[in-house]
């Protein structure tokens, strides 16, 4: 068994997949990088990276030196120690396919796709997706920082992403989110809307598989990371599926629902596992929990106001034909809604950062200060709770005011 696990965790499997898809390191850069793998004191690049991140986290990094020339030199030295990955693309079809697929697991996708389901299809489906997504992602992120298993080493793996390189690897939260979103949407939509279930199943499998394979192509995860992500997500969904309806009823009708929806995610964000170096996992997890909290409160408020914008039954309903006018209204709703969310994000983020930095005597432009838990957690939580509230309460009402929504389709 251990031999199988070691094999699935081998970077050589990732390298083989990348080569089959036409992603290879440039020969000269590969030799140079290989020669730099071990420095004079025998430290490997991952150790160097973790040590540097730990120094920044503890406030002992030379990057805090006020001498701008020294900081510039330090930055150049760091760039020299960690050269950006150099690679050659020999199959551009696979490159664009997997790079686009990888973006289906980033914030830009979540902040557009999930609200788009709310605005153009059924708020019920958005609510169900956000609930499952938040649970799955929190468990996956916490497991990463408890298990502390490294990502595939480079070289030999070619890495196309740098933002999350300091994070740990197992499980792949991209694989977890893709599996959860695809199959939660399939199972929930089947209750609400008439469509060929077999076709939906094929689409769910293909989309989740593309995201999983993209993590190998971009060099960010091993095969073991991806398999574990899919399995963990499937287990969570199977265990929670019988309770989806119960959670939905509590979320909409319980008088304590908004307090639980805000207090529990905020508590979990503050109690996120501490690491000896800074990574983006705590901030990303706070964003996910905050979006879920804001949406949950918003749906509860809609229920109190008597207008939820849900599809009108009996279920499953038959969707109207997809006409050119319907597409035009859908695009208009998407653009207006997205503009409102972006404006909310920029406004609340700007205000919350300045208030918190003023309270703690920090500079808004100080990146390390923004990474401190007492600043990072509340500013990201308040920002994305506001986004969840605007998405669930305000956007559809603006659509009605602008004539972009037909109240005859809602309850």
Image (cartoon, grey):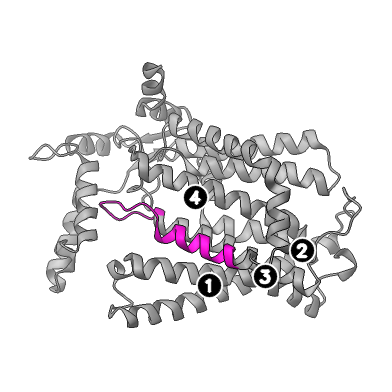
* Residue at the extreme front: 255
Decide: few, some or many residues near mark 4? Use Cα within 10 Å; few <14, some 14-19, many ≥20.
Answer: many
Indicate the quadrant where residue 90 lies. Answer: top left
Q: Please name the residue that numbered disc 1 is placed on.
A: 345
Residue 296 at x, y percent in the picture: 64, 63
Q: Please name the residue that numbered disc 4 is placed on.
A: 138
Taking the magenta stretch, the answer to whether it contains residue 265 is yes
Indicate the quadrant where residue 195 lies. Answer: top right
What distance separates the C-alpha of mark 3 from that of mark 2? 10 Å
What distance separates the C-alpha of mark 1 from that of mark 3? 12 Å
What distance separates the C-alpha of mark 4 from that of mark 3? 26 Å
Are discs 1 and 4 less than 8 Å apart at CB? no
* Residue at the extreme left: 40
Q: Please name the residue that numbered disc 3 is placed on.
A: 337
Decide: few, some or many residues near mark 1? Use Cα within 10 Å; few <14, some 14-19, many ≥20.
Answer: some
Q: Quadrant of the N terminus?
A: top left
Residue 225 at x, y percent in the picture: 44, 34
Instruction: Report helix, strand or loop for mark 2.
Output: helix
Q: Mark 3 or mark 2, which is nearer to you? A: 3
Residue 330: image tag: 2
């Amino acid at each position: 068994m251990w031999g199988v696990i070691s094999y699935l965790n081998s970077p050589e499997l990732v390298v083989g997949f990348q080569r089959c898809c036409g992603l290879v390191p440039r020969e000269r850069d590969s030799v140079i990088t290989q020669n730099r793998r071990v420095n004079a004191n025998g430290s490997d690049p991952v150790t160097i990276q973790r040590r540097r991140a730990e120094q920044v986290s503890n406030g002992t990094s030379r990057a805090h030196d006020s001498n701008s020339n020294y900081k510039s030199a330090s930055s150049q030295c760091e760039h020299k120690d960690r050269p950006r990955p150099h690679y050659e693309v020999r199959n551009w079809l696979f490159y664009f396919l997997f790079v686009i697929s990888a973006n289906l697991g980033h914030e830009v996708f979540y902040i557009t796709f999930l609200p788009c389901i709310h605005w153009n299809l059924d708020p019920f489906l958005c609510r169900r997706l956000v609930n499952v997504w938040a649970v799955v992602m929190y468990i996956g992120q916490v497991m990463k920082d408890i298990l502390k298993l490294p990502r595939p080493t480079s070289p030999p793996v070619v890495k196309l992403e740098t933002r999350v390189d300091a994070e740990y690897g197992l499980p792949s939260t991209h694989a977890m989110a893709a599996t959860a979103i695809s199959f939660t949407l399939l199972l929930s939509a089947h209750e609400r809307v008439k469509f060929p279930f077999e076709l939906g199943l094929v689409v769910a499998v293909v989309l989740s598989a593309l995201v999983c394979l993209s993590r190998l192509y971009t060099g960010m995860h091993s095969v073991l990371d991806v398999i574990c992500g899919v399995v963990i997500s499937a287990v969570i969904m199977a265990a929670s599926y019988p309770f989806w309806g119960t959670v939905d009823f509590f979320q909409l009708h319980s008088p304590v629902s908004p307090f639980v929806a805000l207090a529990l995610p905020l508590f979990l964000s503050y109690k996120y596992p501490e690491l000896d170096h800074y990574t983006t996992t705590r901030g990303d997890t706070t964003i996910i929990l905050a979006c879920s909290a804001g949406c949950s409160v918003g749906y509860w408020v809609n229920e109190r106001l008597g207008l939820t914008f849900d599809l009108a039954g009996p279920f499953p309903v038959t969707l109207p034909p997809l006409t050119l006018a319907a597409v035009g209204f859908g695009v208009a709703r998407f653009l207006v809604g997205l503009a409102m969310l972006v404006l909310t994000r920029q406004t609340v983020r700007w205000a919350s950062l300045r208030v918190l930095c003023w309270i703690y005597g920090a500079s808004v432009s100080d990146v390390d200060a923004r990474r401190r838990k007492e600043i990072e957690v509340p500013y990201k939580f308040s920002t994305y709770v506001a986004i969840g509230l605007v998405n669930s309460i305000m956007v559809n009402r603006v659509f009605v005011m602008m004539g972009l929504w037909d109240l005859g389709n809602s309850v």
